[in-house]
């Protein structure tokens, strides 16, 4: 067992993604902290607080490659956060004249929160691009299989016929909504945090709000109505969004996993040499990709309440909730993106066996068409009689291992109103798809809109 499989040299191949690991890495975090400090100096130079030369020197010195990581770790162990050690090193790198202007009027939480937001901007860009790819793959599947008839299942049992395109559309629709939520959420998440010691910018006097405006412009972030360090709703919304995305991904992956069962065999992950193999059973083709989608989505979901719990800050600066958030948020983002990037090739190369879908429909002897037959007979026999007739025909079919069309043809009450062609029409799954095609079209039309 290892502490974090998503961060290990070996297991990281199946947990998380290299792209998200890079965005949310410690080095990236420190680089974003330096980006904040440099932008702050430039913003204050425009306001006339910091000399222009000092701002340029601080910007040139704000290079993560120049940091002494061992010294920074030692300072963090003493202070609890890396800000003091980082500012000390930046000031030394900038020299005595420019260095005395670093971190002017800011506090640790301004640096930590805004650096996080800068990381989150890159994380959201990753999610947006990869969510587009998955949506495109699912849309192609839905179009290709709009009319591919299969068994719809409820409580793990065959229920009524649907199309595979309809099933894919039920995976696709919530992801389209999730993409809409992502766009709506961005300005609420990507907000500057700059408030000084208690959020009032008192150390900058009357120029505080103006510096905040210039800093937001420098970093291309939304300027909030008020500093938000103790108002974590934006961060919590992102965590919840990840939970929603993961749930939708896991639902689709779980369906594919079940369709891959040997006894079902209606769809499967794309084949590749060694993929999903067994160390002892050469015949196995395990749904390993789907398993990792589900595992990562569930792993992220259980951490979402931790971020919600970390919203409770005391007064103007909390004692402990920040650390709680740090323990969960990065893992949520990494595992959710891992689930997303694992799902994309599955859906892009999903192998669909339409012939097996039809054989599985027929394997039930037509019993799943009982409702269709009852509704077809009801206008002629009355609903009560139609229900009793079909119930009897189903019981005979089950007892004898016969097919429903055959047992219906033996009942004089049925043959009095339906000929052989009429019975065949009512028991053909392709004739009882309801609005499957309409619903699929409506979901696909959301993409066009």
Image (cartoon, grey):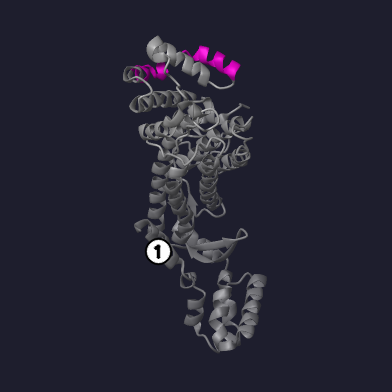
- Work out whether 383 lies above or below 404: below
Instruction: Provide the residue span drawn in magenta.
Output: 57-79
Q: Is residue 66 magenta?
A: yes
Residue at the bottom extreme, as displayed: 416
Residue at the front extreme, as displayed: 206
Q: Name the residue under label 1.
A: 441
* Residue at the (53%, 81%) spot, across then down: 376
- Work out whether 428 lies above or below 124: below
In the rendered image, the quadrant that contains the N terminus is top right
Q: Nearer the viewer, residue 342 or 408?
A: 342
Residue 388's quadrant in the figure? bottom right
Q: Nearer the viewer, residue 11 or 273?
A: 11
Magenta segment, principal secondary structure?
A: helix
Residue 208 placement (x, y as % from top left): 44, 31
Tag count: 1
Q: Which of 97 and 31 is in front in this view?
A: 97
Residue 299 placement (x, y as % from top left): 59, 39
From the viewer's perspective, tell me whether residue 49 is left or right of residue 356.
left
* Residue at the (49%, 26%) spot, across then down: 203
Q: Is residue 131 magenta?
A: no
Residue 244 placement (x, y as % from top left): 53, 48
* Residue at the (42%, 60%) spot, across then down: 443
Task: Assign a secondary structure to mark 1.
Answer: helix
Q: Can residue 285 be seen in this view?
A: no
From the viewer's perspective, tell me whether residue 409 is left or right of residue 346.
right
């Amino acid at each position: 067992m290892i502490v974090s499989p998503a961060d290990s040299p070996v297991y990281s191949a199946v947990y998380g993604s290299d792209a998200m690991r890079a965005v949310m890495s410690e080095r990236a975090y420190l680089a974003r902290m330096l980006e904040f400090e440099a932008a702050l100096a430039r913003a204050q130079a425009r306001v006339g607080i910091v000399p222009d030369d000092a701002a340029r020197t601080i910007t040139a010195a704000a290079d993560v490659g120049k940091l002494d990581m061992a010294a920074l770790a030692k300072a963090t162990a003493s202070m609890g956060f890396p800000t003091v050690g980082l500012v000390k090193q930046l000031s030394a790198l900038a020299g005595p004249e420019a260095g005395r202007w670093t971190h002017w009027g800011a506090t640790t939480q301004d640096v930590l929160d805004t650096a996080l937001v800068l990381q989150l901007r890159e994380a959201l860009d990753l999610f947006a691009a990869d969510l587009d790819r998955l949506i495109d793959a699912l849309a192609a599947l839905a179009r290709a299989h709009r009319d591919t008839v299969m068994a719809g299942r409820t409580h793990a049992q065959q229920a009524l016929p649907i199309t595979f395109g309809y099933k894919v559309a039920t995976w696709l629709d919530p992801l389209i909504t999730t993409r809409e939520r992502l766009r709506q959420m961005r300005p609420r998440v990507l907000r500057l945090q700059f408030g000084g010691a208690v959020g009032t910018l008192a150390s900058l006097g009357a120029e505080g709000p103006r510096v905040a405006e210039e800093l937001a412009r420098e970093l291309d972030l939304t300027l909030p109505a008020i500093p938000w360090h103790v108002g974590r709703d934006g961060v919590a919304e992102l965590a919840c969004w990840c939970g929603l995305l993961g749930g939708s991904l896991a639902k689709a992956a779980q369906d594919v996993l079940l369709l891959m069962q040997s006894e079902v065999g209606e769809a499967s992950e794309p084949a590749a040499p060694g993929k999903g193999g067994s160390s002892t059973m050469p015949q196995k083709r395990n749904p390993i990709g789907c398993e990792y989608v589900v595992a990562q989505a569930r792993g992220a979901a259980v951490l979402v309440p931790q971020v919600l719990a970390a919203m409770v800050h005391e007064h103007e600066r909390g004692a402990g909730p920040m650390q709680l958030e740090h323990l969960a948020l990065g893992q949520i983002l990494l595992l959710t993106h891992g689930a997303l990037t694992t799902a994309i090739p599955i859906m892009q190369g999903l192998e669909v066996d339409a012939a097996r879908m039809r054989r599985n429909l027929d394997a039930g002897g037509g019993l799943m068409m009982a409702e269709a037959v009852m509704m077809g007979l009801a206008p002629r026999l009355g609903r009560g009689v139609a229900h009793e007739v079909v119930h009897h025909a189903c019981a005979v079919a089950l007892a004898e291992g016969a097919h429903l069309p055959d047992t219906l043809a033996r009942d004089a009450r049925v043959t009095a109103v339906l000929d052989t062609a009429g019975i065949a029409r009512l028991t053909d799954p392709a004739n009882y798809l309801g609005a499957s095609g309409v619903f699929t079209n409506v979901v696909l039309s959301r993409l066009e809109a």
